[in-house]
Image: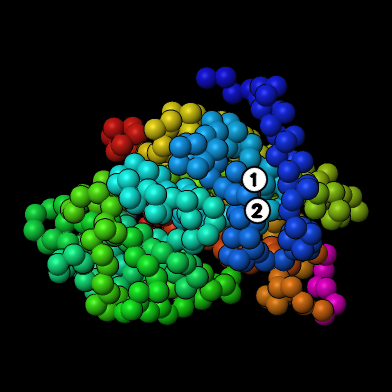
Amino acid sequence: MDLRESAADRAFREEVRSFIAANLPQDLRDKAEKGLRMHVADGQRWHKILAQHGWGAPGWPKEHGGCGWDHSRQYIWEEEMALAGCPPLSPFAVKMVGPVIMGFGNAEQKARFLPPAGNGEHLWCQGYSEPNAGSDLATLRTMAVREGDNYVVNGMKIWNSYGHEADWMFALVRTSSEGKSQEGITVLLIEMKTKGISHRPIITIDGSHILNEIRFDNVVVPLANRIGEEGKGWTYAKFLLGNERALIAQIAQSTKLVKRLKEIGARELSDGQGLIEDADFRAKLAAIEVELEALRVTNQRVLYEAKTGTAGNGGAILKSKGTFISQALSELMLEAVGYYSSPWALEQLETGWNQPPIGPSYAKNAMPLYARQRANTIEGGTEEIQKNVIAKQVLGL
Ligand SMILES: Cc1cc2nc3c(=O)[nH]c(=O)nc-3n(C[C@H](O)[C@H](O)[C@H](O)COP(=O)(O)OP(=O)(O)OC[C@H]3O[C@@H](n4cnc5c(N)ncnc54)[C@H](O)[C@@H]3O)c2cc1C
């Protein structure tokens, strides 16, 4: 595998840059420049613009409306989007449920669900975790009981991201309590406006409403919304988790943060000279950058080997290293902006804030980012679980 960027890749990078320069709406560009918070609606709007250009689902094969790009093009696309400050796209549709539907759904499901998932029309969320089923996911208890042509679902999901804004959920439900707990799990696609679904917000330490508790009270889900076979959901769930972990590694976003820290380091002073000249700061930033470069190469390798569409156990390696890097960068960001990170004024992150700025524009997101990144080593499976996967599945210990 040749890791160097080919002439064709460099030309592609230019094409992506030109596309973003010409098509990213000015108000979103302003938000990025001012360090304001991007919301789901911003990402969805940008996704639709990309989809009009045929770039809605880069990793999907062309037959399903994707771009059919290889791993290096996908990475270039993501990196350029992050560097330009484009709103992040929701991963649930394109990177998570899409590949599962392609791999295990029937023809009718592919025709029905893939186009609106790939073009940003439908927002999706993930219904895996429950109050007593996180790391030990197979113990989940949300029940789906067969009644004629439907399942009737009762139970509860927790830590559900964006369920209050999503159109659809891919959910793990229990259809049998017999045998091993993994064997009674089924995947259902559930429309969020179905009668009997309610949610309660969970506000996180960074002041965001992203997470929810979701309740199902006699929610009727047509049999036609079941992916694959009843009781085989654990296989599909694991396929999806490999991809989820790979994306939580946030390599493109960390690349952007390194660049930002260098810019901040040139502007902030330490003992009368640029912070970037400070030996301690330089050493810390250099150490993270080296780790990030190694991770970028590992990511290329995992994507290259994952031509079948899943990052598999490689996702655990990427997540473990990637979240260590993203947390280290968020800590360095606090160091770089110093006391300007102390005021907790989340209103500064929203459009319309018209009070005098507290410190330089790049300072206001430092503390919320630091707080948000604490969750990185929990979401998608905790660090301990990734280490268990690496030990058992990758190293065979
Ligand atoms: C920001 C955020 C977003 C999320 N979004 C979603 C979402 O959209 N959908 C969804 O379904 N879930 C979501 N989650 C939930 C996430 O997947 C779980 O929090 C995670 O899997 C851990 O489960 P838990 O919280 O129940 O912790 P537990 O499983 O109770 O773990 C508690 C502690 O015990 C440790 N531990 C547990 N088992 C082992 C073991 N075998 N070996 C060693 N240590 C162990 C863990 O590492 C952890 O430190 C989200 C979580 C966060 C923080």
Disc 2 target residue? 49
Q: Which residues are magenta?
A: 355-360
Identify whether 31 is placed above or below 300. Answer: below
Residue 374 visible in the current orientation = yes
Instruction: Report helix, strand or loop for mark 2.
Output: helix
Residue located beneath label 1 in the image: 53
Q: Nearer the viewer, residue 293 or 189?
A: 189
Q: Looking at numbered disc 1 in the image, what kind of residue is underneath it?
A: His
Question: Magenta stretch mostly in which secondary structure?
Answer: loop
Q: Name the residue located 44 percent from the left edge and 58 percent from the top edge.
A: 379
Q: Total marks drawn?
A: 2
- Taking depth in this image into account, of 174 and 346 the one nearest to the observer is 174
Give the Cα distance between marks 2 and 1.
7 Å
Q: Percent from the top left, x then y, of residue 313?
A: 37, 38
Q: Quadrant of residue 387?
A: top left
> In the image, what residue occupies the spot 40% across and 60% down?
126
Residue 325 lies within the magenta run:
no
Circle 1: is it few (<14), some (14-19), or many (20+) Cα within 10 Å?
A: few
| Proximity of marks 2 and 1: CB atoms separated by less than 8 Å | yes
x then y, percent, for residue 16: 70, 39
Q: Is residue 37 left or right of residue 30?
A: left
Taking the image as shown, residue 315 lies to the left or right of residue 48, namely left
